[in-house]
Image (spheres, rainbow, N blue to C red):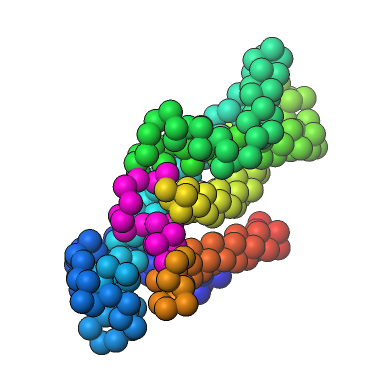
Amino acid sequence: MRLAVVFLLVEFTLVLIAPLIAPHDPMQTDVAAQFQPPSSEHLLGTDMLGRDVFSRILYGGQRTLVTAVSATVAAVILGTLLGLASSVSNPWLSRSIRVFIEALLAFPSLLVAFVVLTVLGAGQTSLAVAVGFVSIAPYAQVTHSSIVSTRSAHYVEAAKAVGATDWQVLWRHIIPNIQFTLLAYAGVTFAYSLLNSAALSFLGLGGEPGIADWGVMLWEGRGAFRAAPWISFVPGFAISATVLTMNALIKRSRIHTYYFA
C-alpha cells in the first residue's frame, strides 16, 4: 500500500514539474534524430519526428492525468449528489433519477463520450467533460446502492425510532458508514477515466494531432512498433502502471477498512 502511494505521488510530482525537468521541448522536431534508441541524450529515445519521448511522456502525463483527475472530481461530486437525491427525495423524483442513471448505464461509455465530444468538439476541456459525464451514472448507482443497503441496518432503525429525520439519519449514520466505499470507488473512477481518456485520444478525439498525450503517443507509435517499440511501449507502460497501482491501492485500502474499521 505504501509503495502504491509513493509511486502515485512520485508520478504526479514528475508530471506537474515537467517544465522544470524535461530536457527537451516536447513539440520540437528533428528529422535527423528520428527513431533514435534510448541514450544519454534521449533517455527514452525519439519518435518518428525526432521528438524526445521522455519529454513527451512527462508533458503528456500532465495532460492525461489532469484530464482524468478533473473528470473524476466532477463524476464524484455529481454522482454523489444524484445518488443522494435518488435515495432520499420524493418517490417521483427518485424514480426519475434512477431511470436517468439506468438509461446512461445501458450504453457503452465510449459511445456516450464520443457523442458528447461530437457536440462539444475536440479539446482537453471537452475530453474531461465527456469522460466525467460517462462516469457520473456508475458513481451515482454505487452511492444509491450503498445508501439503500445501509438503510436497513439496526443502528439506522434505532435512530429513526428515537425521532431522527431522514436527513439526520443520512448525514449522521449512513454517510459515515459508506464513505470508505465511496472513496474506494472514486479510485476506480479515476482508473476508468484514465483509460477512457487515453482511448479517446488514441482515436483522435482528444485534441490536435501531435500533442503530448499518452493516448496520442500510443496512436503515433502503432505504425513504427517494430522499428521503434519504445514509442508505444513507454506511454502504454505509464497507463498500465498507473491503473494497476491504483487498483492495488484500492484493494489494500478495502482490506484495511474491513479489518480495522
Left or right of 200 in this view: 80: right
Compare residues 73 and 25 and report the one nearer the observer: 25
Question: Where's residue 164, x and y in %?
Answer: 67, 24
User: Residue at position x 67%, y 27% from top?
Assistant: 103
Farthest-out residue, bottom: 40
Q: Which residues are magenta?
A: 205-221
In magenta segment, residue 96: no
Does residue 29 appear anywhere in the picture? yes
Compare residues 71 and 223 and report the one nearer the observer: 223
Left or right of 67 in this view: 104: right
In magenta segment, residue 212: yes
Q: How many marks?
A: 0
Query: Picture quarter containing residue 140?
Result: top right
User: Residue at position x 43%, y 28% from top?
Assistant: 119
Question: Where's residue 54, x and y in %?
Answer: 31, 72
Query: Picture quarter containing residue 95?
Result: top right
Does residue 242 appear anywhere in the picture? no
Query: Picture quarter containing residue 134?
Result: top right
User: Residue at position x 54%, y 62% from top?
Assistant: 243
User: Residue at position x 22%, y 71% from top?
Assistant: 31
Question: Where's residue 118, x and y in %?
Answer: 44, 32
Left or right of 105 in this view: 9: left
